[in-house]
């Protein structure tokens, strides 16, 4: 083989080797790239899982701390159930009113209860109650207004009851006594640590008419309208009984001359 032919053969050999290496490198890159992508995705998934584990560990620690205070929470729950019990307990409320009346030297002339009714709170109403500024901006629009209906149509979940174990019972109380005593009675009725009564209306009038010798000239009659609440125990769901206090002794009845709540004239 002539030197010229040998040089030409070497050149082709080098070109063939170079092209082969290029194909090998290119093939290797194309084959390894999916593995690199898979490795990156695996690393991202692992990082997300670690972050999720950290958040869940924080939540577990928080729940563990709360569980250590479970006795305190149970004691608090019992205190709250005195103010908003799980049954009507109307006779207990009557005794409570009698105690307040006796404390402030006020006569309870009448105490009546209406029919309890169930109150369902939807998610939209609950959210509205937590944003008082927005509520005032709406000008006191009722929760059943058109704007709320439109919002409920846009988000059906907002119209579903958040809880429906809440009941209210109307209460009317009529009392007589001195002006300052009546005010203290009304304040005690709303600020006592026992059963909560939400007062919605108060009507007052002067005593007038027949009065006993121990009644002062500034005696007034006051009619208080409001409501008491019941929140059923979710672990014992049932309708509110009409006479859950039947086992308790009956309250003293009036003979037309004495106050049935305090026994005073």
Image: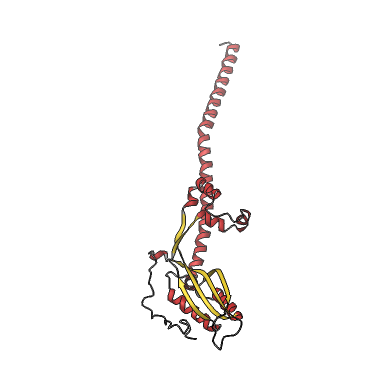
Report x, y in % for residue 32: 51, 34
Residue at the far left: name it. Answer: 247
Report x, y in % for residue 138: 61, 53
Q: Nearer the viewer, residue 20 or 142?
A: 142
Q: Quadrant of residue 219?
A: bottom right
| Residue shown at 50% from the left, 51% from the top | 158
Residue at the far top: name it. Answer: 2
Q: State the scheme by which the image is colored.
A: secondary structure
Report x, y in % for residue 139: 62, 55
Residue 30's place in the image compared with 12, above or below, is below
Residue 42's place in the image compared with 137, above or below, is above
| Residue shown at 50% from the left, 57% from the top | 56
Q: Number of labelled discs? A: 0
Residue at the far front: name it. Answer: 209
Relative to residue 87, is residue 15 drawn left or right? right
Q: Quadrant of residue 133?
A: bottom right
Q: Nearer the viewer, residue 122 or 74?
A: 122
Report x, y in % for residue 180: 61, 80
In which quadrant of the rendered image does the N terminus lie? top right
Q: Nearer the viewer, residue 79 or 51?
A: 79
| Residue shown at 50% from the left, 39% from the top | 38
Q: Nearer the viewer, residue 116 or 123?
A: 116
| Residue shown at 47% from the left, 71% from the top | 81
């Amino acid at each position: 083989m002539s030197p010229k032919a040998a040089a030409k053969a070497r050149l082709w050999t080098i070109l063939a080797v170079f092209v082969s290496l290029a194909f090998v490198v290119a093939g290797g890159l194309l084959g390894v790239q999916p593995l690199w992508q898979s490795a990156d995705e695996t690393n991202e998934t692992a990082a997300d899982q670690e972050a999720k584990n950290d958040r869940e560990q924080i939540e577990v620690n928080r729940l563990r701390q709360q569980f250590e205070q479970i006795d305190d929470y149970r004691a608090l729950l019992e205190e709250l159930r005195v103010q908003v019990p799980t049954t009507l307990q109307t006779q207990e409320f009557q005794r409570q009113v009698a105690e307040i009346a006796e404390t402030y030297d006020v006569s309870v002339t009448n105490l009546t209860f209406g029919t309890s009714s169930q109150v369902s709170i939807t998610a939209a109403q609950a959210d509205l109650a937590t944003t008082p500024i927005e509520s005032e901006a709406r000008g006191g629009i009722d929760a059943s207004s058109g704007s709320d209906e439109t919002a409920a149509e846009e988000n059906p979940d907002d119209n579903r009851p958040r809880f429906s174990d809440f009941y209210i019972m109307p209460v009317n109380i009529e009392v007589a006594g001195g002006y300052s005593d009546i005010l203290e009675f009304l304040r005690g009725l709303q600020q006592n640590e026992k059963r909560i009564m939400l007062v919605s209306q108060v009507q007052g009038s002067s005593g007038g008419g027949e009065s006993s010798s121990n009644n002062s000239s500034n005696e007034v009659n006051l009619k208080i309208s409001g409501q008491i609440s019941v929140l059923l125990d979710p672990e014992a769901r049932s309708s509110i009984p009409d006479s859950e206090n039947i086992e308790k002794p009956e309250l003293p009845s009036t003979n037309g001359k004495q106050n049935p709540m305090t026994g005073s004239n």
